[in-house]
Image (cartoon, rainbow, N blue to C red):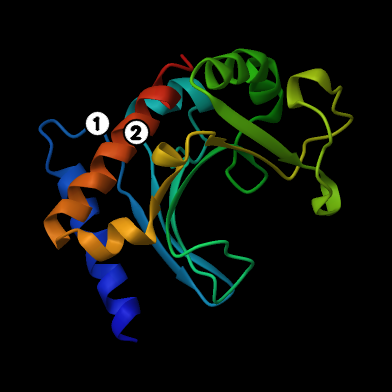
Amino acid sequence: MTARKALRKLFERVQENLLSREPSPFVDPLIVFRDDEWPRLEIGMKSWTAIFGEKAYVNKLYVYYQTKAAWGGEAEGFYFEVILWHKHHRSDWTLAKSKLPQWLSILRKNDFGHWTLLKGNRELEKAADKYDFPEAPTQISACSNDPNIAYIAEADLQTKRDIDLVNLCIARIDQHCAVISAFK
């Protein structure tokens, strides 16, 4: 419980920092704690509606706290993932499918990898822009190939003061948001 409260407090401080920018370019970040998945902060920018669609859920950057104790976590620390498409995000698959080659090109230029989950959570074994989808996939996600961008490792957690950890999270969020914003 103590760790959960500390994590929530950290997410709240990051959330407050993002929303305190004037004018704030962010939609309300969502803090998610569920019993069956890693805790996370979901972040989106107002300008992303032009990218993902007016009706789409634009909180496309997920900041997970992963743990080795559950759900196949490989480490203790933060993990940053971009959700390009998710069947529950109310996005227009036709629009996303048409923009996917451009998005993946930008991700590759920024040294991000991606993966696709098809119906039944089967992983697509090729690049999404090289596949002719007969139907919308379950999810398409991306992550930096550079561990210094994709993760905040346990060693960092142990050596940083609270404010330094918040600032590091913000810096990584800004890096990821810049990549997503380039999708235009």
Which residue in the structure is indicated by mark 1? 25
User: Vertically, is 123 above or below 105?
Assistant: below
Which label is found at residue 43? none
User: At which x and y percent is residue 57?
Assistant: 49, 41
- Element under disc 2: loop
Q: Which mark is residue 45?
A: 2
Q: Earlier in the sequence, mark 2 or mark 1?
A: 1
**Mark 1 closeness class: few <14, some 14–19, many ≥20 residues within 10 Å:** some
Relative to 18, is 65 above or below?
below
The local crowd at label 2, few if under 14, some if 14 to 19, many if 20 or more residues have their Cα within 10 Å, is some
Left or right: 11 with respect to 96?
left
Q: Residue at x 62, y 69 (%)?
A: 71
Q: Please give the name of the residue rendered at 34% of the width and 33% of the height, measured from the top-left corner.
A: 45
From the viewer's perspective, tell me whether residue 108 is left or right of residue 94.
left
Residue 70: x and y, percent? 58, 74
The single residue placed furthest to the bottom in the displayed view is 1
Label 2 close to label 1 by CB (< 8 Å): yes
Q: Amino acid at mark 1?
A: Pro
Counting from the top left corner in percent of width and height, residue 1 is at 34, 86
Image coordinates for residue 28, horizontal then vertical, percent: 30, 47
Against 121, residue 149 (above or below) is above
Residue 51 lies left or right of residue 164; in this view the side is: right
Residue 180 position by quadrant: top left
- Residue at 31%, 69% (x, y): give it: 7
Question: What residue is rendered at 48% in x and 17% in y?
Answer: 183
Quadrant hosting residue 148: top left
Judged from the image, the secondary structure of the residue bearing numbered disc 1 is loop
Q: Marks 2 and 1, Cα distance to the nearest angstrom?
A: 6 Å
Q: Nearer the viewer, residue 51 or 147?
A: 147
